[in-house]
Image: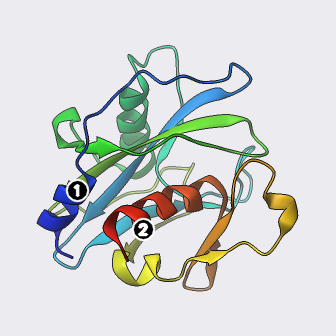
Amino acid sequence: MNLDELKSVLSKPVNLKIDYDEHYSLASVLVVIHGKEPQIVMTEKPKHMKFHAGEISFPGGKLEDDDSDLLDTALRETSEEIGLHISREQVIGQLEPVVTLNSGFLILPFISVIDEIPPLLANPEVEKIFHIPLKSFLKTMAKDPDPSHNIIQEMYTFEYQNQIVWGASARILKQIRNLVGF
């Protein structure tokens, strides 16, 4: 599947209003897919982080008072974390919100599919930046064998270079996998 096909499948009107349980803190992430052979950008969090230490995730974070909306949060966090500046116009859609089990976040994922991106530069909130081949990555999906993880919804894992992607990031990836049909 090339970028134009991905854009067609993943394009969806952006709806910034979401209903949510007030027990959750709002957050958002940006799913960036780029390149002739489509790759997805993910990051590894440093081990010293308060939330999600050492996890593989998408650039993003918590809604701040200065953010006008959750899309603004995702764009700001992507710029801060990996030095990638994406405009609102480059966001082609969003996925269904996902929740985190331990940290109490409701995360709204946005999607940007772009031809090329400049070299990225990690800030202190990012240990490593990955450019993961999308098709082969999505094919690594497995159901999480630990039933204690199934409190909120079904859990899945994905694998890249012996790293396991799980939790909210894996549920976001599963939505993409369902849409693109890999």
Q: Nearer the viewer, mark 1 or mark 2?
A: 2
x and y percentages locating residue 112 in the rendered image? 27, 50
| Nearer to us in this view, 52 or 104 | 104
Colour treatment of the image? rainbow
For the point 72% across and 45% down, the residue is 51
Instruction: Assign a secondary structure to mark 1.
Output: strand
Residue indicated by mark 2: 177
Residue indicated by mark 1: 113
Position of residue 22 in the picture relative to residue 140 (left or right): right
In which quadrant of the rendered image does the C terminus lie? bottom left
Instruction: Assign a secondary structure to mark 2.
Output: helix
x and y percentages locating residue 180 in the rendered image? 32, 67
- Amino acid bearing label 1: Val
Label whose residue precedes the other's in the sequence (1 or 2): 1
Is residue 165 visible in the rendered structure shown here? no
Position of residue 8 in the picture relative to residue 15 (left or right): left
Can you tell which quarter of the image residue 106 is in?
top right
Q: Residues within 10 Å of mark 1 (few under 14, many from 20)?
A: many
